[in-house]
Amino acid sequence: MRSEHAQRRAGFIASWKIRRIIVKLGSGTLTDASLGLRETTIRALAEQVAKIWKDRGIEVVVVTSGAIAAGRKKLGMVERPRTIALKQAAASVGQTTLMRAYERAFERRGLMVGQLLLTHEDFGNRERYLNAKNTLETLLSRGIVPIINENDTVATEEIRLGDNDHLAALVTQLMGADLLLLLTDSDGLYTRDPHRYSDARQIPLLAKVDDELIRAAGGKRGGSVGTGGMGSKLIAARVVTDWGTPVVIASGLSRRSILDVLDGKETGTLILPRVTERAPSRKMWIAHALQPHGTILVDDGAKKVLLEGGKSLLPAGILGATGTFRKGDPVSIGDRKGRVFARGIASWSREQVEQGLGRKSAEVRSILGADIPAEVVHRDNLTILKAGT
């Protein structure tokens, strides 16, 4: 007899209209420290994707790690490269190996693949963001499976996305996907580390990802071949579920994980969406794809109006600002204690904010000129963050 959790999972998957999924595979799943690239894992992925695409009409976008790890093997590196130059060299060599394996595996099942290499700049710039979306939509419309990776060959610390769990979360929002599937070398989330504690139990269903759970999972600590870890997966899952899309963390070493999840079987950990309707793409882009250039601090009254009234940010409620930002730059908005609760795109520069803070509109125009916008951050360019974001 099925458990209550299993029944809830099966019912949710059956009711959730899944037409597009993002599948992310980590380095720990795709590569082995001694053997290099696990092509059997890629072949199993291709077989499952072909079945659900052709038989169920579900489109799939793959976010992959593994280029650096594959390059290490070819270059004879014993340890993970630590300098940017070595990482970029390993990624350059490994990327060709990785894509060749994907191409072979998918072509055997009658599918073509297309490669996209992205950095944070591709998400932070609205035009490049939309160009990436259009490219992906075109590939999918032609039955081509997009394979996405971070562009490690050119990424610097300033423009890195951090890890491919975060990249997968951004791609899920970019494409309006119905499900994010994080495939890892673990078969889901456990109550404790199953490698250390015999009484650890798998968690089949999770309603919420909170700070305590992320801390217990170890933050973003990774292994010898990856940069993520369960903590980074939970951080990505919180972002995605807070904005209305479910996430499953499951084993990438199984030959049936994707099929079993879509069939409603008790595979991995299903994390339910926190809201029933997904937020507009632009709001999610402001909240998570942009890197703030500074922070605007506001008083309690302004915070309340922004949180409850859906209003724009006016200069009268501003206490101060930090960082360096110009008109059109992304900024965080924090309360008097510095706690960030919103993000937006500034209509004023940092210097203008400093000159006009705490003033009424008439005073502002006499100081900064009649052409200055009334709103420091317009409500159409402002997103309230979910708790814990």
Image (cartoon, helix red, strand yellow):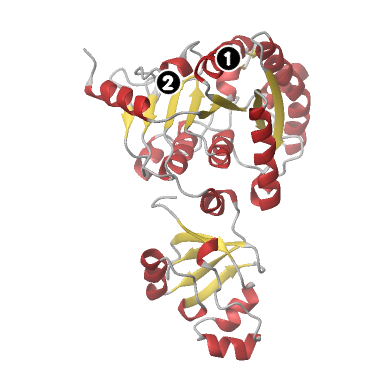
User: Is the N terminus in the top left, top right, bottom left or bottom right quadrant?
Assistant: top left
For the question of whether residue 289 can be seen, the reply is: yes
User: Relative to 84, is 91 above or below?
Assistant: above
> Residue 50, labelled with which disc?
1
Secondary element at tag 1:
helix
Q: Quadrant of residue 14?
A: top left
Residue 141 in the image: above or below residue 196? below
Pointer 1: residues within 10 angstroms few (<14), some, or many (20+)?
many
Q: Position of residue 4 (x, y in %)?
A: 22, 23
Q: Residue 262 bears which disc, if any?
A: 2
Residue 157 seen in this snapshot: no
Apparent side of residue 185 relative to residue 13 in the rendered image (left or right): right
Q: Is residue 247 left or right of residue 283?
A: left
Is 157 or 46 nearer to us in this picture?
Answer: 46
- Quadrant of res 330: bottom right
As measured in the structure, the alpha-carbon distance from the residue carrying label 2 to the one carrying label 1 is 14 Å
Which of the marked residues, 2 or 1, is nearer the chain's N terminus?
Answer: 1
For the image, the number of numbered tags is 2
Badge 2 density bin: few <14, some 14–19, many ≥20, Cα 10 Å: some
Q: In the rendered view, does 164 fall on the left or right side of 178?
A: right
Residue at the image point whose x is 75% and y is 33% from the top: 88
Q: Name the amino acid, label 1.
A: Ala
Task: Tell me the kind of residue under disc 2.
Answer: Leu
Residue at x 53% of width, y 21% of height: 57
